[in-house]
Image: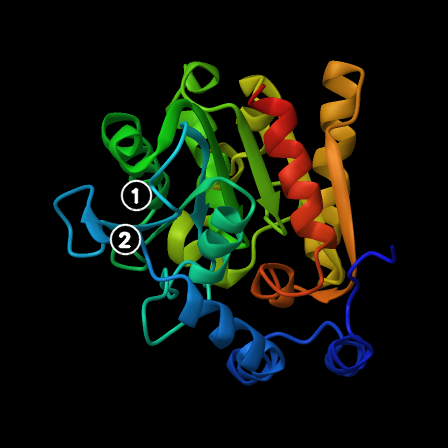
Amino acid sequence: MRPLLQPEAHRNAIAAIGRAMGPAVLADCLAIFEDEQRALQATMPPLVSNAVYGDHARHRLDLYGSGQGERKPVLLFVHGGGFVSGDKGDEGAWANANVGRMAASLGMVGAVMNYRLAPEHQWPCASEDVGLALDWLRANVVSHGGDTERIVLMGTSAGAIHVAGLARLRPDLTDQVRGLILLSGLYGFTPPEDKDLRYFGDASDYPDRAPGQALLLCGVPMLLACAEYDPARFQREFLELESALLERHGAMPATYVASGHNHYTLSLHLGTRDVRLASEIAWFVEECTR
């Protein structure tokens, strides 16, 4: 049977966009998947909405899944947004919530979180929030069908940076999570841009605050991904982290390059008929949560 692949219309639309980024590009990318993701949204409401995992108004997360049967692996997803924007999604907005729904469709408990945003909340606030959400899951997800010993963290763009940053904050991360999935993040292998400093602070602080070195030491299995039409800097960071992990550990991490996708569609397409990355995620979660 032929695997479900990227529709030609989607491939052509994304290729026409190329490596561009910005609000107008994001809107175009959302439109590509609008009908398919809205249909999925209608069939899979949250299992839990706006669970409170901390004191701030953005300390909220949603859960997706059946809540029934034997305990399932848990996938916690952290959205992107250039450090200053983004949302977990809700009944009116499917973006990012689609990753929780994808996880549920793969037999997991999907968790999707909000976190504090820059510039009001700078480094390491967002990574601290990932840690708080992880603590909430470890304390509460059993009652919603999740297995506290089989939690995997996943982030895209700024969200990948915040997930990676937890490796610095939690030296015992190997005891708390079973894997990290990092989509198109920046880990400190290239010089910072002005927009990065909205979160990391002064450029002189960036080398010590970027998460790359902590990732090399943390020992948690990783799946690294980037997109064919990611900007060159994101692709370079992907390759540099892959190479550094190979140099340190003598083996490559699991890696995936999403052909026919860009920086935004790498996560926005998850849950659609294009199951290539979703299949990689399912494989990785199964492998590291055995």
At 58% from the left and 60% from the top, the residue drawn is: 271
Q: Which amino acid does label 1 sit on?
A: Cys
Q: Quarter holding the N terminus?
A: bottom right
Q: For mark 1, what is the residue?
A: 125
User: How much space separates mark 1 and mark 2, taking CA atoms?
Assistant: 7 Å
Residue 97 in sight: yes
The image quarter in which residue 32 lies: bottom right
Q: What residue type is labelled 2?
A: Arg
Rendered location of residue 100, percent (x, y)? 45, 52
Color scheme of the displayed model = rainbow
The image quarter in which residue 175 lies: top left
CA neighbours of label 1 inside 10 A, class few (<14), some (14 to 19), many (20+): some
Please state which of residues 16 and 128 is positioned toward the viewer in this rendering.
16
Q: For mark 2, what is the residue?
A: 116
Question: Mark 1 or mark 2: which comes first in sequence?
Answer: 2
What is the number of the mark on residue 195? Answer: none
266 to the left or right of 88: right
Q: What element carries label 2?
A: loop
Residue 30 in sight: no
Rendered location of residue 213, percent (x, y)? 58, 27
At 31% from the left and 60% from the top, the residue drawn is: 119
Residue that sits furthest to the left in the current view: 55
141 to the left or right of 179: left
Rendered location of residue 60, percent (x, y)? 23, 51
Rendered location of residue 154, percent (x, y)? 51, 42
At 36% from the left and 63% from the top, the residue drawn is: 87
At 29% from the left and 41% from the top, the residue drawn is: 129
